Amino acid sequence: MATERTLALVKPDAVAKNAAGEILAMIQKAGLKVRALKMLRLSQAQARGFYAVHRERPFYDSLVAFMTEGPIIAAVLEGEGAVARYRDLMGATNPANAGPGTIRKLFAQNIERNAVHGSDAVETARTEIAYVFSELEIEP
Ligand code: UDP
Ligand code: MG
C-alpha cells in the first residue's frame, strides 16, 4: 500500500466540547502522522466551497451553517493507506451506524453534527488539503 495524505477536520461541535485533543490522540495512536495542524474559522463562502460537491443536497445549507458556527481544527495526516485508515477510525457518517471505538461513535451527536471530516479518496485529499493549507504550512 502506498503512503498517502488525507485531510482531517475536527468540526465545530467537537472543538466546542473540548474533544479535539482526544481526537488527535486517537489519530496518533492509530499510527497516522500529523504533517500540518491549525485552528481556523471557515467563512460562509469557504464552507460552501469546501462542501461544493454537496450543493444540490437538501442538507447543504444546514451543513454550511453548522461548519461556520465556531472554529475547526484542520490537520494533514500521512501514512500507508491513510485515506481509508482514517475513514475507518472516523466511523460511519451517521453515528448510529458507526462501529464501537470510532471517533464518531464516541463524539458525534447525529448525522450532521458528526465531529470529524476525512477525505474520501487520494485525489479528493489533494484538493481539500490545498483548499485549507498553504504549501508553507505543510511539513514536506
Ligand atoms: N451530512 C448531513 N446529512 C446527511 C449526510 C451528510 O448533514 O444526510 C453532513 C455530515 O456532516 C457529513 C457531511 O455532510 O459529514 C458530508 O457528507 P458525506 O456524505 O461526504 O459524509 P462524510 O464523508 O463526512 O462521512
Ligand atoms: Mg465526504
Image (cartoon, rainbow, N blue to C red):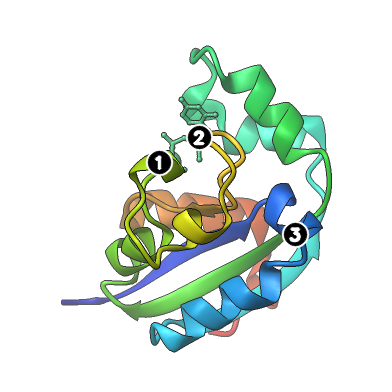
Tag on residue 96? 1
Q: Is mark 2 within 8 Å of ligand 1?
A: yes
Q: CA distance from mark 3 to mark 1?
A: 21 Å
Q: Is 34 placed above or below 129 here?
A: below
- Measuring from the top left, give residue 2's x and y in whole percent: 21, 77
Distance of label 1 from label 2 (alpha carbons): 8 Å
99 displayed left or right of 32: left
Query: Where residue 89 sits: x, y (%)?
Result: 38, 66
First reached walking from the N terminus: tag 1 or tag 2: 1
**Local secondary structure at mark 3:** helix
Secondary element type, mark 1: helix
Q: Residue sitting at 41 percent across and 63 percent down?
A: 102
Q: Tell me if residue 106 comes above or below residue 35 in the rendering.
A: above
**Which quadrant holds the N terminus?**
bottom left
Other-residue count near label 1 (Cα within 10 Å), few / some / many at <14 / 14–19 / ≥20: some
Q: In this figure, which residue is indicated by the disc labeled 3? A: 15
Instruction: Give the label on residue 111, or none.
Output: 2
1 left or right of 80?
A: left
In three-dimensional space, the C-alpha distance between marks 2 and 3, rounded to whole angstroms, equals: 17 Å
Between 30 and 54, the residue placed more toward the observer is 30
For image coordinates 60% across by 58% down, the residue present is 9
Report whether the residue tagged 3 is closer than 8 Å to ligand 1. Answer: no
- Residue 139 placement: quadrant: bottom right
Q: Could you say which is closer to the camera, residue 130 or residue 100? A: 100
Q: Are marks 3 and 1 in contact (CB under 8 Å)?
A: no
